[in-house]
Amino acid sequence: MFAKLTLLLSTLPLALGHSLVADIWANGVHYNGWDPNTAGPYRVDTPGWYTTNIGGSPLYPIDANQLQIICARGGSNANFTAPVAAGSDVRLRWWQVNVAWPESHHGPVIDYIAPCNGPCSRVDPTTLKFVKLAQRGWINNSTYQEGYWASDELIADDGSWNVRIPVDLAPGEYVLRHEIIALHVAFTGTGAYSPSGAEFYPQCVNLNVTGSGTRSVVGGVDARELYRGDKPGLTLDIHATNDHSGYPIPGPPVWTGALAARQLAA
């Protein structure tokens, strides 16, 4: 019995070594994120999509065309949708086992949005068409051997990230897909694409956007078409240097509607 307990305790830090969105703020209101490690009332009051991803484990390039890449392993619709005003920020805080995000897991932070065309609580996730709202990758060559990345910026802000909802986005229900891509084991050492290299950590949140905007989301794609594992942004050796200027952030370009909204708000 003691040996079994010792084994369990020794593997616990590995099982719970990653992270998930534990807190969500929209219109200044706080919501719990969905925590698959904890039983409780989360299925009632969270706009965060439910997952079976105990421990916050990653997905890999081999998962890039699979259902779990849309909204995490075992992802299914949240029953609740958080209201948020167009032009405001949704704040998301990563946290698990007293750690916001592993410092070694450097990489980009990317945000997408897709219209549900009805209640997000009932939308079929395979029908969601996402556009990229924002992206941030390598920032500068300070602090770490691998350089300073968007993930490090997230850690420095209490493990949190702000996502601006376009000011002219048409009212309706949307799924926000927020993602960190960790690159610490992306490079195989041979230059070859590895199906178990870069790590994907997608998290989804139901939002009910309010306001008088008229811009519709067009040109979106199925999340299963966002990435290919052999793309340069997913096969980078981040340990070779701290200067990664020109790093190509994975996925499609930022949606023209999001860019236009920034010009409108400027």
Image (tube, rainbow, N blue to C red):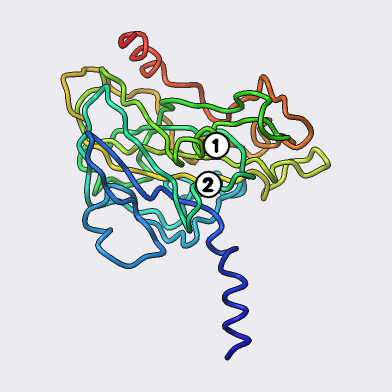
Classify the position of the N terminus by image quarter: bottom right
Amino acid carrying mark 2 in the image: Trp
Q: Which mark is residue 101?
A: 2
249 or 136: nearer the eye? 136
Q: Which mark is residue 165?
A: none
> Judging from the image, what secondary structure is the residue with disc 2 in?
loop
What residue is drawn where x is 46% and y is 62%? 54
Kindly give the residue lying farthest to the right in the view shown.
Answer: 190
**Residue 262 in picture, x, y percent from top left:** 36, 14
What residue is drawn where x is 41% and y is 64%? 37
| Quadrant assignment, res 18 | bottom right
**Residue 181 in picture, x, y percent from top left:** 56, 40
- Sort mark 2 into few (<14), some (14-19) or many (20+) by Cα contacts within 10 Å: many
Left or right of residue 139, residue 96 in this image: left
- Sort mark 1 into few (<14), some (14-19) or many (20+) by Cα contacts within 10 Å: many
Are dots 1 and 2 in contact, CB under 8 Å? yes
User: Which badge, 1 or 2, comes first in the chain's sequence?
Assistant: 2
Left or right of residue 84, residue 54 in this image: right
What residue is drawn where x is 77% and y is 44%? 188
- Residue at mark 1 to residue at mark 2: CA–CA distance: 8 Å
261 or 230: nearer the eye? 261
Amino acid carrying mark 1 in the image: Ser
Query: How many numbered discs sit on the rendered protein?
Result: 2
Left or right of residue 165, residue 198 in this image: right
| Quadrant assignment, res 176 | top left
**Residue 183 in picture, x, y percent from top left:** 65, 40
Q: Which residue is mark 1?
A: 151
**130 vs 194: above or below:** above
